[in-house]
Image: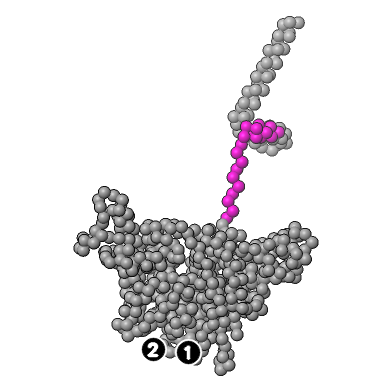
Amino acid sequence: MPIAIGLEGSANKLGVGIILHPTTSRDDSPPSPHDSAHSEDGASPRRSKHASPPVEILANLRHTFVSPPGTGFLPKDTAAHHRRWVVRLVKQAMKQAQVQLEDIDCICYTKGPGMGAPLGSVAIAARTLSQLWDKPMVGVNHCVGHIEMGRAITGAENPVVLYVSGGNTQVIAYSAQRYRIFGEALDIAVGNCLDRFARVLNISNDPAPGYNIEQLAKQGKVLLELPYTVKGMDVSFSGILARVEEMARKLEASRTGAEGPWTDDETGEEISKADLCFTLQETVFAMLVEITERAMAHVGANQVLIVGGVGCNERLQQMMGMMAGERGGSVYATDERFCIDNGIMIAHAGLLAHRMGFKTALEETHTTKQTTITDMSTKDTTPMGSDAKTSSASAADKKDTAVPTFTDKEDRVMKIAWTCLKSGPPDVDIAKLTKAAGFNTTKTAANTWGVIKKKLLSMGGEGEEGEETQDAPKTPKAKATPKKRGKKADADGEDDADAGAGAEDGSPKKKQRKTPVKKGKKAGQAAEEEAAAVKGEDMDEAA
């Protein structure tokens, strides 16, 4: 029975999951990337003959980087958090799942989309583990991971998918071996809108700003007017955010100013922070329900699957359920274990791809910050990867990519280094590695691991700190001090002599620029010559 470990770290949540796909004797063939699809004549969804038994979740651990209230999370700080926790989570997951290294069939990681630095940190960790354990890697599209995990948990066959999170707002359906986006946010994601609103109200980020907004909204009673922007199956949240932020500042001013409390014009009730949260939730969720219903009518579906971090919101699930019920349909959603970014969804989608014969070559284990779900086709050999072109790269492209090779000694050291990992790959305890690998000195161990570490970091193109590689900044020009100017003037004098000698040989004489130092030196020489001349005249007169 195949087992995979998945690493997810596209944003502020680091997840490690281990999953097992049971196999049955009646059907040993690999599963289809989609067990159900619309028939060619447009009939209702049908269950495929390759329908696989329920998956078995062996471990699903997660650790969140929480920033102070009123602030967001920076890529650099988030990447540092992931590097600090990834080894600990991997070890805990292996222990909880009660599996050994030889039981793992593949290592899956998030290839994109997401934040560059956190993605790079997790990719380096996955790449290191792949080399240490000698296991193949599978790059997984983050969006596909959410959808496939939601389908596996809920049993939804071929639903219209509402994918709502901090970085994505999309209405997706599956057709003709490809995921297709029917509607999306034209500016910012709904989760980003909620997060930024929480910062204005100084709402806590622990465990998540969206969760705290949901709890406050349950206490709200007054529904205020906000912009409602729906264009076909697309939505826009930037205008709503600007207006509700203005309301938040007005609320704060009413509490501290002399004008008194802010009251509703119709009911006369005092406006509270809970009312603003309630108003924002009701407005944006109504927009999401509208575009989802429009997509359902377009494709003739009667199932809705809600995935992504915002999908945990019970009010959104309730509103979507009311709409689906009126259409004779049903809503599928999961709890925070699977809605919020997690490693088990990456392990599940990656293992599906691995069982179909796909793996990501080492030279292709880079990450991509911006990748849409429509960039790939599940008909190809890369059904769950973030880019269907990765396995069909031309020979010329592969030739241009230098893939580092490891010696037998380096392979042996890498396998031993797994027991010596310190904080985050590829950092190890050198003293422990020296003893475990039988090195004579710590210097030899450090040098050997330094070579291995450099090769590991060079495979995917990420910098050592997990951030996007950029052109190295130019070294600033040293400031010229008076002492340096004097030395340069002396050197220029020698060059002048050489230039004069060259002029005699017929070569063109270089015109020298008179600097203040040169002018001062020349004036000093003239003064000395004049003084010597005067002294000579005085001696002649004395004689």
Mark 2–mark 1 CB contact (< 8 Å): no
Residue range in magenta is 471-494
The residue lying at 46 percent from left, 57 percent from top is 68
Q: Is residue 77 visible?
A: yes
The residue lying at 49 percent from left, 68 percent from top is 113
The residue lying at 50 percent from left, 88 percent from top is 51
Using the image, determine if residue 257 lies above or below residue 276.
Answer: above
Is residue 313 within the magenta segment? no
User: Is residue 236 shown left or right of residue 383?
Assistant: left
Give the residue at mark 2.
44
Give percent across and percent down for residue 94. Answer: 61, 74
Using the image, determine if residue 364 lies above or below residue 272.
Answer: below
Numbered disc 2: secondary structure: loop
* Quadrant holding the C terminus: top right
Judged from this view, the residue extending furthest toward the bottom is 26
Q: Is residue 400 visible?
A: no
Give percent across and percent down for residue 7. Answer: 56, 71
Give the residue at mark 1.
48
The residue lying at 62 percent from left, 78 percent from top is 99
Using the image, determine if residue 410 lies above or below residue 22.
Answer: above
Query: In which image quadrant can residue 503 be found?
Result: top right
The type of colouring in the image is one colour
How crowded pointer 1 is (Cα within 10 Å; few <14, some 14-19, many 20+) is rated as some
How crowded pointer 2 is (Cα within 10 Å; few <14, some 14-19, many 20+) is rated as few
Kind of residue at disc 1: Ser
Front-most of residues 110 and 66: 66
Q: CA distance from mark 2 to mark 1?
A: 13 Å
Give percent across and percent down for residue 269. Answer: 23, 61
Front-most of residues 160 and 332: 332
Give percent across and percent down for residue 354. Answer: 58, 80
